[in-house]
Amino acid sequence: MAGTQVCPRCSFENHSSSRFCIGCGKGLSGTGAASGGGELEPHENPELPQPATEDLLKRVVVQSKYEYKPTKAGFRVTVPLAEQRQQKVYVMFNGHDDEGHDIISFLSICGPRTDKHADALLRLNSRLPYAAFAIKTIEGQEFFVVTANQLAATADPEEVRKLLYHVARRADALENQLSDGHDVY
C-alpha cells in the first residue's frame, strides 16, 4: 500500500506520517516517537500546581484503585473497561483559570485525527455530560482526545473518580471505532 509504513511489532499498515501504530501503539521508526520511550506524552505545561493540588491528584489516583504511573505533568491511569479493554487517562495539572485557581485536567487519546469524524464529534459534544471530544497536537501529530477539566479547589474525590471513568469510557468507544477494534491507547 503506497504511503504507508508497516509496524514492526504487529504488522499493521499505518499512514506514512503516523508516529505511532494504530494497531498496537508502538512508536514507529524514523518519526522521533522513540525518543520518548515510544509512549505519547500529551502535556507540556511549565507551570507548577499548588501543593494542595498535587496532593489531591495523588490522593484521587491512589483511591481510584486503578493502576497508575507518574508522568512529567501528573499521572497516567489505566482504567479497566468491559470486554477486557482498558484505556489510559492522563490526570494532570493544567494551569490556572482567570482567577488563579488550579485546574485539574483529564485527557485520554482516542486515535489520529481524521476529517471523516471531526464534524460528528463536535456535534456530539453538546450532549455529553462529563467530557468533550477535542483535537490535540501530541509530539507533532493531531489526535482525537476526550478531555474534561475540574477546578482543584472544588474537586470532590467521588466526582473526580466519575470523571476519570467517563473520560476513559468515551475515549475507548471512539478508539474502538477508529482502530477497527484494536485496544491501543
Image (tube, rainbow, N blue to C red):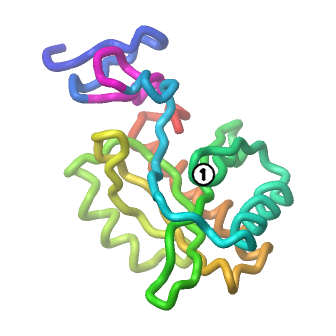
Residue 74 seen by the camera: yes
In this rendering, would 70 be left or right of 90? right
Above or below: residue 40 compared with residue 8:
below
69 and 124: which one is in front?
Answer: 69
Q: Majority secondary structure of the magenta segment?
A: loop
Residue 57 placement (x, y as % from top left): 72, 63
Name the one closer to the observer, 98 or 38.
Answer: 98
Q: Is residue 81 visible?
A: no
Q: Position of residue 167 (x, y in %)?
A: 58, 61
Q: Is residue 146 above or below residue 25?
A: below
| Highlighted range, magenta | 18-32
Q: In this rendering, is residue 137 above or below 185?
A: below
Task: Give x and y (percent) for residue 70.
Answer: 68, 45
Q: Residue at x 37, y 19 (%)?
A: 28
Category of crowding for the residue at label 1, using alpha-carbon neighbours closer than 10 angstroms: few (below 14), some (14–19), many (at least 20): many
Q: Nearer the viewer, residue 9 or 176?
A: 9
Residue type (three-letter) at the residue carrying disc 1: Val
Q: Quadrant of residue 6?
A: top left
Residue, disc 1: 89
